[in-house]
Amino acid sequence: MAFCVSPAFAHAAGERRDGPMIEVYKSETCGCCTQWIAHLQENGFKVKARNVPNTAAYRARFGIPAALGSCHTAAVSGYALEGHVPAAEIRRLLAEKPRAVGLAVPGMPLGSPGMEMPGRVADAYDVLLLRTDGRQEVYRRYGTQ
């Protein structure tokens, strides 16, 4: 299956010979963004963090609806990543290469990568696949059986 590479990602995707680079746009002071980056690195991804004053501008640039916003936006291999997307789903996205804008975990659900809080019950949350035609579908559910 083919996938769509937006011209907006030409610079941000940062594809390298030794694997894809995830470029993260975040606030300089956000601790959970830093924890999500650590999750990505622990799972073998290379990460380039960019502190920006307005992550909403990147969300719009990459085609993520504002209603799905979180605290950081990222780009990898022509796809957008919004929020605390687990590394396993990023790997799946890159392997399957669906025709999509990317993945989103709206809000900041407890228990998602970077939002773990010992002693607190994790929220159930969905990882959404954002299709290029504007449709959204559940890519994977977490915390529900």
Image: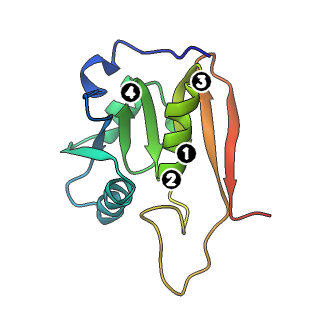
For this rendering, which residue is in front, 18 or 21? 18
Residue 142's spot in the image, x, y percent? Answer: 66, 59
Residue 20 occupies quadrant: top left
User: Marks 2 and 4, Cα distance to the nearest angstrom?
Assistant: 16 Å
Q: Name the residue rendered at 31%, 27% in the picture.
A: 13
Q: In this view, does 32 lie above or below 79?
A: below
Pointer 3: what residue?
98
Pointer 2: what residue?
86
* Amino acid under disc 3: Pro
Q: Is residue 143 above or below residue 13?
A: below
Label 2 or label 4, whichever comes before in sequence order: 4
Q: Name the residue rendered at 37%, 58% in the picture.
A: 36
User: Marks 4 and 1, Cα distance to the nearest angstrom?
Assistant: 14 Å
**Total numbered badges shown on the rendered structure:** 4
Most distant residue in the bottom direction: 119
The label shown at residue 77 is 4
Pointer 1: what residue?
89
User: Marks 3 and 1, Cα distance to the nearest angstrom?
Assistant: 12 Å
- Label 3 neighbour load within 10 Å: few <14, some 14-19, many 20+: some
Q: Name the residue rendered at 54%, 34% in the picture.
A: 93
* Amino acid under disc 4: Ser
Residue 123's spot in the image, x, y percent? Answer: 63, 67
Q: Is residue 137 above or below residue 135?
A: below
* Amino acid under disc 1: Glu
Q: Label 4: state its secondary structure.
A: loop
Residue 143 occupies quadrant: bottom right
Q: Which quadrant of the figure contains the N terminus? A: top right
- 90 with respect to 131 (left or right): left
Q: Are marks 1 and 2 in contact (CB under 8 Å)?
A: yes
